[in-house]
Amino acid sequence: MTSATAKSVFMPRFTSTPSSASTRSSFLPLFKSSSSLSLKLSNSPSPSLVVRNVLKTLDSPEISISKDRDLEFTSLDAKPTVLVSEKLGEAGLEVLRSFANVDSSYNLSPEELCSKISLCDALIVRSGTKVTREVFEAAKGRLKVVGRAGVGIDNVDLQAATEFGCLVVNAPTANTVAAAEHGIALLAAMARNVSQADASMKAGKWQRNKYIGVSLVGKTLAVMGFGKVGSEVARRAKGLGMHVIAHDPYAPADRARAIGVDLVSFDEAISTADFISLHMPLTPTTSKVFNDETFAKTKKGVRIVNVARGGVIDEDALVRALDSGVVAQAALDVFTEEPPPKDSKLVQHENVTVTPHLGASTKEAQEGVAIEIAEAVVGALRGELAATAVNAPMVPAEVLSELAPYLVLAEKLGRLAVQLVAGGSGIKSVKVVYTTARNPDDLDTRLLRAMITKGIFEPISDTFINLVNADYTAKQKGIRISEERVVINSSPEFPVDSIQVHISNVESKFASALLDNGEISVEGKVKDGVPHLTCVGSFSVDVSLEGNIILCRQVDQPGMIGRVGNILAEQNINVSFMSVGRTAQKKLAIMAIGVDEEPDKESLKKIGEVITRTSDGGVRISHLRKRLPRVTMPGTISQI
Ligand SMILES: NC(=O)C1=CN([C@@H]2O[C@H](COP(=O)(O)OP(=O)(O)OC[C@H]3O[C@@H](n4cnc5c(N)ncnc54)[C@H](O)[C@@H]3O)[C@@H](O)[C@H]2O)C=CC1
Ligand SMILES: O=C(O)C(=O)COP(=O)(O)O
């Protein structure tokens, strides 16, 4: 553990407060973050540490992401650029145009997309654009959000998005009914050979006997994937007099019961169904889940509808099953490769009805999806966390609103704690302690934890850190972040009473921040909606975490405040508040001074000297004196 050598720390008062957080747009600095000034965590113990506030205010039009990204937003009111790579409803485009420059470029090749993307802050796609790792790499850190104007996000490399700190949002509800209606349309059309009969008539034929169909009423339909679309299909199929069963390992049984649907195992579903309708997402688990083995278990003559994703079916196996009559008919809206090859046996098969991925293609759904995704993307570019985030912690809007000031506190405590670490000592583990009167079920700490992690890593990392990649970054760096809740006996009106951030097994620049067990520890609370620093090490203080703060370790004695105040006054620096935390009278104390402007190096040096001169002349101080000349004032410049 480090020796107790640091004497004074200059820290920021933080300017951002959650202020007028609306229900939806609660403050979440998802992308608004520091403007990344130089960060030099020095190894040398310092009598004064400058920690500069750089969090932006909520209302700032500036969107700054990191040092590099700042360069792209050259003026405060420069608009971000949104690339729309597939057709999007006009209402959504209008929402986008009110906030950003919109580049609607359709049918881009992968190379064209990669070359355009480095000039874009957001990308909006449907199912036809593959957003691969190469796209994120080519974005060179500028791309902040990918909006999927629809549900399925299997065309977006989520892992790469997360690694690059790029938020992915989707529009999960606006096309549900459209997809369900298309599923029912295909079901009925398939059962009655509508498309085949239509083609035959258009070819001049009149084949009434050839196109005798099968009835739906009384038949068993297995809905595979009982989510939004699956439930709507089930509801409609029941209206057609079908017996509906469903398979979904994650769906709540009571939701199924409410619609009059039995949830059954995969094998039971496929072996008892006359019709099977697919509504699960394409994931590694569902990929080719319908294969030779599966078809061997189905009823002979089963009929299959797929409006989910082509990839959930092994298409070669389906052709074999159709040829052998195991599958009587299939109706497919989606394909492994879109568009499928012109000579696709599946598409050409006489017992197959096909549509070119039209599930979401109604006027109503496209308008709804466009607005839903445009609002989510604009919100994300403004620094809000979208309720439809796919790769970031998601909490309901009302919880977000309540947590907002605590999120600001969490990030600031993380930033503060990490800057008390002597550079190079290597953080291995961080413990976060929440004191709360709430039950664990009533307090979701994922966002708080992510904000603390962001606060810790942003100042010490070259890469852009946000809520999206904070956990990933911690894991990559091999840093363990554990959480502990201490339930206290007070009113559960507020979600959290205090948040403590402990960093263990590191050396500290500011020895007073260390607890007896050697951990760097800072604690904060939210008071009247404003984050406050309430403890540094074992010293109680009460400092609003806004703007700039000078922290000094000193021996409690008369005159110190005046001396330090004079030095600041000479530089025309206004002291806005101060707080002293001490163990006992005339013993070691921490002085926290809020200042409106940032003192220069010389002033900090003078403060350091005053504190050193006037403190007890014991061994510790002479040790300090000896070390002082070796310290470059103000020691360390970083940011909170
Ligand atoms: N053809 C089209 O134009 C459209 C296609 N879709 C597709 O439909 C899918 C479903 O959409 P929503 O219902 O809105 O999504 P959702 O997320 O509400 O429902 C998906 C359901 O699948 C379940 N599931 C996950 N793994 C499963 C598995 N191995 N077996 C069975 N069920 C599983 C989930 O628990 C969830 O309940 C989307 O992922 C998308 O691929 C959606 C809209 C339009
Ligand atoms: O929402 C979905 O998952 C869909 O498949 C709709 O795709 P689209 O937006 O029509 O390309």
Image (cartoon, rainbow, N blue to C red):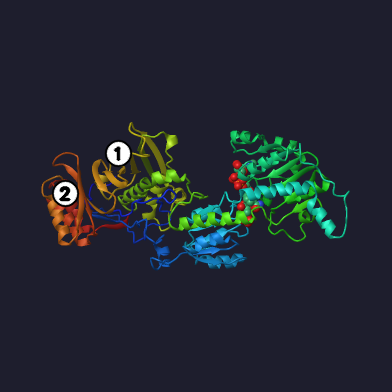
Residue holding disc 1: 517
- Quarter of the picture containing the N terminus is top left
Q: Between residue 67 and residue 213, name the one nearer to us.
A: 213
x 42%, y 64%: residue: 68
Residue 61 in picture, x, y percent from top left: 39, 61
Q: Nearer the viewer, residue 61 or 502?
A: 61
Label 1: state its secondary structure: loop
Q: CA distance from mark 1 to mark 2?
A: 23 Å
Location of the C terminus (image quadrant): bottom left
* Chain-order first, disc 1 or disc 2: 1
Left or right of 281 on screen, residue 222:
right
Q: Which mark is residue 387?
A: none
Q: Residue at x 80, y 47 (%)?
A: 192
The relative height of residue 66 versus residue 591 in the rendered view (above or below) is below
The residue indicated by pointer 2 is 621
Quadrant of the image occupied by residue 115? bottom right
